[in-house]
Amino acid sequence: MPDPRRSAVLGSPIEHSLSPVLHTAAYAALGLTDWAYTAIECDETRLPALIASCGRQWAGLSLTMPLKRAVLPLLDRTEPLAAEVGGANTVVFARGERHGYNTDVPGMVAALAEAGVTAPSGATILGAGATACAALAALRATGLASAVVLVRDQARAGNLLAAADRLGMEADLRPFDSEVRDGDLLVSTVPAGAADLYAERTGGSRPGPAAVLDVVYAPWPTPLAQAAAKSGAVVVSGFDLLLHQAARQVELMTGLTPAPLAQMRAAGEAELTRRATLPPR
């Protein structure tokens, strides 16, 4: 078995991250009783010093917003997929080097496939941030060459357009309040509440999207997910995405495959249930 190691998830804010629960469950199932995974509050200004402080005991880091793009200049090696997407959500320390990966993309593909969504006829993405860039790459993996992207401010979509160019994808930018094409896979990458407009439309008389992936996992179900399920669409949750991308991170950091998906899922669902019973803060 690998030597005892440390790993962590970094981001700001980070206190509500479910990653420690998922990774800790994986370590237990794999018999890595001396491994530890924690959450560390870290913004872009603190990131260089924090990564530099990670010694030989560190196996890897998971990165959330706003660090996925900020970490790229700090890496010794970046896998081609992460370079194409323009963001790495995983750092693996190996042989004195920092290797960057993007597990959001395979995690999204796996979550969709698990729900039976393997070859969508078309796709619409809400938002233009780092997760939207990963969504473009995931859609490419399903065989699509283009996607409609609904954004509030097209002037701030430069990173997404650059990612689309690197990926060989066409991103058709449209205003955020545009209609979603009937039959599309709708991927919402915006924060909780931002997609409520589409919940109202999805619950209407039109056919609406054939499938919906909402990256939000708490509170769940979101109004968009509820409306999509009511209309008969396939619904994929943010927890499904989080679970599958975390499983790939576990494999990269530990070198052990496959990750114990069932145990990770059970631990994550139990924690979400526990949190749902807590009084509002």
Image (cartoon, rainbow, N blue to C red):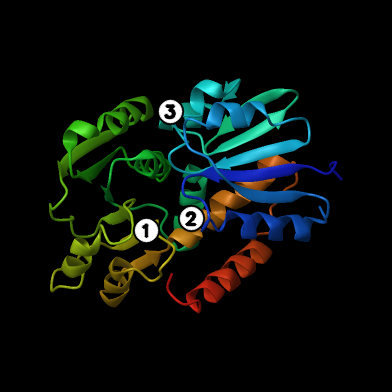
Mark 3 to mark 1 CA distance (whole Å) = 22 Å
Q: Which residue is mark 2?
A: 241
Q: Residues within 10 Å of mark 2 (few under 14, many from 20)?
A: many
257 over 182 or under it: above or below: above
Q: Earlier in the sequence, mark 3 or mark 1?
A: 3
Residue at x-position 29% and y-position 56%: 186
Give the quadrant of residue 180: bottom left
Q: Nearer the viewer, residue 26 or 276?
A: 276
Marks 2 and 3: in contact by CB < 8 Å?
A: no
Q: Which residue is mark 3?
A: 84
At label 1, the amino acid type is Leu
Give the quadrant of residue 116: bottom left
Q: Nearer the viewer, residue 131 or 109?
A: 131
Residue at x-position 20% and y-position 73%: 203
Residue at x-position 31% and y-position 30%: 159
Left or right: residue 232 compared with residue 274? left
Q: Which residue is mark 1?
A: 213
Left or right: residue 37 compared with residue 108? right
Q: Residues within 10 Å of mark 3 (few under 14, many from 20)?
A: many
Marks 2 and 1: in contact by CB < 8 Å?
A: yes
Q: Is residue 207 visible?
A: no
Give the quadrant of residue 41: top right
List x then y, in percent, for residue 65: 44, 42
Q: Which secondary structure lies at badge 1?
A: strand
Q: Nearer the viewer, residue 165 or 95?
A: 95
At label 3, the amino acid type is Glu
Residue at x-position 48% and y-position 37%: 43
Mark 3 to mark 2 CA distance (whole Å) = 20 Å
